[in-house]
Image: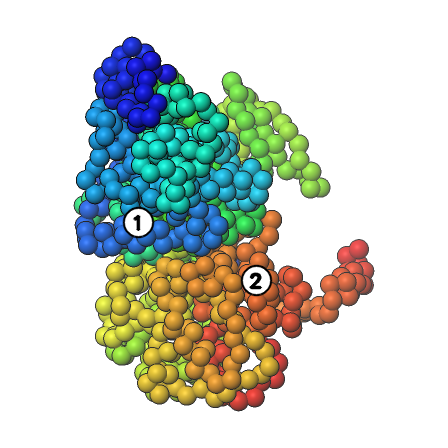
Amino acid sequence: MSATILVPAADPEPASGSPLGIPGPLLHGLLLLVALAAFAWIVRRRLLVLRRGAPDPRLDRLGERLRRLLVIGFGQSRQLRYPVAGIVHVLIFCGFLVLLFRSLTLLGQGFWGGFAIPGFAGPVYAAVKDWTGLVMLGCCAVAAYRRLYVKPARYHDRLALRSHGGEAHVILGLIALLMVADAVFEATTLAAHGGRSWALPLASLAAFALEAVPDSARPGLGVFAFWLHNVALCCFGCYLPVSKHFHVITSLPNVFLGKLDPAGRVKPPRHGLPPGAQPGEIGVRRLADFTWKHLLDFFSCTDCGRCSDVCPAYATGAPLSPRQISVKCRDEAYAAHPVFGRPPAGARPELVGGLIEDRELWACTTCRACEDVCPVTIEYVDKIVDMRRFLVDDGRVPAGMQKALGHLEKKGNPYGKPGKKRGEWVAADGGDCGVRVLAAGASAPLCFFTDSATAFDPRIQRIGRAFGRLLRAAGADCGTLGADEVDSGHEARRVGEEGLFESLREQNLQALAAREVGRVVTTDPHALNALRHDYRLGEPVLHHSELLAELIAAGRLRPFALADGRTYTFHDPCYLGRHNGVYEAPRAVLAAIPGLRTVEMAAARNKSFCCGGGSLYLFREGEGERRMGELRIEQAELAGAQVVVTACPFCLINFEDAIKTTGRTGRIEVVDLAELLERALVTAAPPAATTGA
Amino acid sequence: MDIIVCIKRVPDLAEAGLEIAADGRGLRTEDLDFDINEWDDYAVEAAVRLKEQHGGVVTAITVGDEDAEEVLRRALAMGADQAILLDDAAFAGADPFAIATALHACIRSLPFDVVLCGAVTSDGASGQVGGMLAALLDVPQVALATGLEVDGGRARVRHEVEGGLEREVEVALPCLITAQSGLNQPRYVSIRGIRKVADVAIAARSAGDLGLAATAVGEAGSRVRLEGLLLPPAGKRAEILEGSLDAAVATLVERLRERGGL
Ligand SMILES: Cc1cc2nc3c(=O)[nH]c(=O)nc-3n(C[C@H](O)[C@H](O)[C@H](O)COP(=O)(O)OP(=O)(O)OC[C@H]3O[C@@H](n4cnc5c(N)ncnc54)[C@H](O)[C@@H]3O)c2cc1C
Ligand code: SF4
Ligand code: SF4
C-alpha cells in the first residue's frame, strides 16, 4: 500500500504513513468525520420519527428500570429459551462489549501510533480480545450455517411481505471481516510482541497464514488490514441504523424504557389526557398515533421471530404473526421517513386496515406469549388493543363480536341473558352452595365476583357452586353481587371498546361500594385481571387458586388422597400466569392432594399455550386452520396426562370442546381446580364417571 | 342525494320471559331491553353507505315516545345527519297503516331520493309499513332488498321474491326500498360514538305539527282493531333425537315423512 514503510521488521505504523498521498492521521480524521456525520444524520432522522409519536411516560421508577437493564439487557436473560441461537447471541453480545475497547484503540491508532486505552493495553486484554475474536468468528460461522442450511422455521415467516434475512448476512459478513482484518493487523505486529502463542490464537493463526506472504509485503499488508478494519467499522456503525440491526443500538435503551406497569394493565387510550376528556379520534390508525416508545419498539425488533414462534394464533394458521406487525411498521416508518432526500410524494398506504389488516388484529387473544419471550421486551398487547380501539371507533367489528358487545351494553353479559337472572346460578341445581346473594347494604368478609361465564354458562356455574361449597366447608362466609354485578368488561376493553369497559366498570364499582365487603375473590382470571389492574383494586382481589391454597395452608381444607391411577397436568391460564404471575398457588393446591400424580407440560408456566379464549374469541369463528384448544390438549397428551386441570372458565370451555371435536371423550378430561379439590374432599375413591359434559 | 330512513325501537324477545301487560293489549316492558329493529339497522347502514358514495343528507325518523330517541341517536352515530321523532299520545295504538300515515305526513314535506325501511320488525312482524308508505308517497317500492346500487337517477336492487329466489330490478328515483338481512353488515356503534352525538338536537313533531287530525293516527286511525294479546300455550311436542348422527338423521327423515313434510 504505502511506499513509506520500508523496514520489514518494525511494527506497521498506520499513523505515520501517507496512503493515497494524504498523511495518515488526516485521512483517518476525514474517514471518521464522514462516518460520524453520516451516523449522526441517520440516527437523527430516525429519532425524528419518534418525536412524532404520542406521549408515553417512561422515565419513572429508575431503580426498577436499571434492574431490568442489567438483567434482561446486559444479562441477556431471555436469550436462553432458544439454546443454540441464544448462546450464539449471548457470545456475540459479550464479544461486542469486549471488542468495543479494541475498536476504540484502533481508531486512536489512526491518529497516534501506539495509542492505547489505559487498562486495555496489556497482555491480558490482548489475550481476551484475541480469544473473543476467534469465538466471534465461530459464532458468525454457526449463525450463517443456521441461516443457510438449518433454516429454523421461525426465520421464515409465512406472513412476511419481504425477507430481511439478507441484512443478517451483511452484518455477519461485516463482523467476520472486522475479526479477520484485526487478526491480520495483529499478526504483522506479532514479531515485536514475542511471536505466536496460545494466548493469541487468532493472531497466531493469521501469522501462520501470512508466512505465505513475502516478508517485505507484510507491513504493507498490516497497514492495509488496519485501514480495512477501520473502514469496515465505520460501515458497520452506519449500516446498523438503516437495517434491522438498529437493535444493536436501540435494544438496551428499549429494555430500560420497557413497560413497568403490571403486565395485565392495558395502557389508557392516550397518556396524559385529563379524565373525562373526549378526544376526536382514539386508538391507532397511522404510524404517528403509536406512542414514541412503541415506535422505538419497531426500531428495536431484531426480527428473530421468537414472538411468532410462540404465538398461538400463528401456530393455528390464523392470519397473525406478531413479528410482522413490528417489521411492517418499521418498513413503513423507514419508507415514509427516508434517511436521505424528501419523503416520497403522494399519500402513504393505510396502516391499520391496509398494511395491517383488520383480521390480523382480531386474531390475537392477548395471551402475551409474544411479549414474554421477546428478548428486547417489545410490547404487543397494548399496540394491538390500541389499533383495535381505532377499528371499534370506525365501526369495523366482526359480526359475532358486535352481537356480544351489544349484549354487554344492554344486558351486562355477552350471552344476551336477562341481567336480573345474574345471581340465579347459586342455586340453579336446586341446591344451596353456600354463597349468599348480597342485597345492597349487606356485608360479607368475602365477595365472589363471578363474571359472566360463571353467572350464565350452565357448565361454568357448576365450578362456581363447587367453589362455594369448598368455602362453606372451610367455614368461610362468602357473598356475591347478584343482579347488580355486570360483566367485568375485561374482554370489552381488550377488543378496543373502551367506552363500554368504562361503563361496566362504573356499574361494578358502584355495586361493590353499595355493600360492605372485605376481600374479593373470583374463579375467572379475566375478572381477576380486570379488577386488580384495570379497576386498580389491587391485592384485595384474589383468584380462587390463591384463596384455596391459603385455606389449605391454614388447615381449613384437608384434602383426602386422590390416587385414581390417572396423571394430572395443570394448564396455566394466560391471565393467571403471564399477566398476573400466579404460578405457585394452583400447584400448591395440587400438591396438597395426597397421592395425586402430576406432570408438567413442556409449555408450562410462562410458556403456557393459550386455550383460545381471549378477546371474545368464543363469540366468533376464528380464522385459524386449527383451534388453539385442540393443540393444547395434544400437548397435554404428549406430556402423558389424562386430566387437564385448569382454573379459568374459558380454558375449560375450549378444552371440553376440543376433546369433543377431536373424539377424545373418555380418554382425557378437563376439570377446574375447585372441582378437583372438591372431589378430593368428598371422596377418597376415583369418581364414578368423568363429569366432563 | 337525500335519503330518509324509518326506524323502530323494539324489545329484545330472544331470551326474555314474555308477559302480557295488565290491560291485555301489550307486553310488560319493565324487564325488557330495547334496541333498534335488526332490519332497520341494515336500512341505516345502507343509507349511510349511499351518502358516503354519493354525498347528501341522511334523515332518520321514528314514531315513538322519548325512549325511542335512543335508536335515533344510534342512527346519528352510524352517520345519519339529522333525526326526527314523531311523538304524540295520539300515535298510540297504531297499526301499520296508522304508522305509515304518520311517516307519510312527515316525509311528504321533505326532499328525498330514497326512503329506506326495514323489511319487517322483530316485534310486530307485519312487514306492511314499507309498502303502505310507498303507496302513500306514490313512489315505486322494492321489498326485501339484498343488494343496492344507485347510479344517476336510478337504483339497481337485488331482492328476494317468492320461492326462495332473488332477482335484480331497476327503479327510477325517488323510490322506497325495504332492507332484508344480507343487504350489508352494519357497522359497530361504540359507546363513544353514541356519546359523540349526545348533544345533537333531535326534532320532535306532534300530529298537529304534521297537519294530522288525532283521529287519523294511532288507534283511531288504524284499520286493524286489536282485541287482546295472548301468549301461545307451551307445546308438549318438543323432542330431542338421541343417538348417533346417522341414527338421528334417519329418525328425523322418518318423522318428516310420517307427517307429510317430505
Ligand atoms: C294494538 C297496538 C298497539 C300499539 N301501541 C303502540 C304504542 O303505544 N307505541 C308504539 O310505538 N307502537 C305501538 N304499536 C306498534 C306499532 O303499531 C308498530 O310500530 C306498527 O304496527 C308497525 O308494525 P310492525 O312493527 O309490524 O312494522 P313492520 O311493518 O313490520 O315494519 C316494517 C318497517 O316499517 C318501519 N317502521 C315500523 N314501525 C315504525 C315506527 N314506529 N317508526 C318508524 N318506522 C317504523 C321500519 O322501517 C320497519 O322496519 C302498537 C301496535 C298495535 C297492534
Ligand atoms: S418482537 Fe421481539 S421476539 Fe418478535 S421478532 Fe422482534 S425481537 Fe424477536
Ligand atoms: S398476545 Fe398472544 S395471540 Fe396476540 S400476538 Fe401475542 S402471542 Fe399472538
> Is residue A649 placed above or below A269 in the rendered structure?
below
Residue A610: x, y in percent? 48, 58
Closer mark to the observer between disc 1 and disc 2: 1
Residue in the image at 52% along x and 72% along y:
A599
Residue B200: x, y in percent? 28, 38
Q: Please indicate, yes or no, whether residue A506 appears anywhere in the rendered image.
A: yes
Q: Return the residue nearer the eye: A476 or A550.
A: A550
**Any mark on residue A547, and which?**
none
Mark 1 or mark 2, earlier in chain = 1
Residue B228: x, y in percent? 50, 61
Instruction: Find the distance from the CA under tag 1 to the CA under tag 2.
Output: 34 Å
Q: Give the letter of the chain under mark 2.
A: A
**Amino acid beneath label 1:** Phe
Badge 2 is on which residue?
A: A635
> Is residue B79 placed above or below A90 in the rendered structure?
above
Q: Quadrant of residue A410?
A: bottom left
Q: Return the residue nearer the eye: A185 or B72.
A: A185
**Amino acid beneath label 2:** Gln
Residue in the image at 29% along x and 10% along y:
A21
Q: Which element type, helix, strand or loop, lies under badge 2?
A: helix
Q: Quadrant of residue A191?
A: top left
Q: Classify 10 Å Cα crowding around label 1: few (below 14), some (14-19), many (20 and above).
A: some
Badge 1 is on which residue?
A: A74
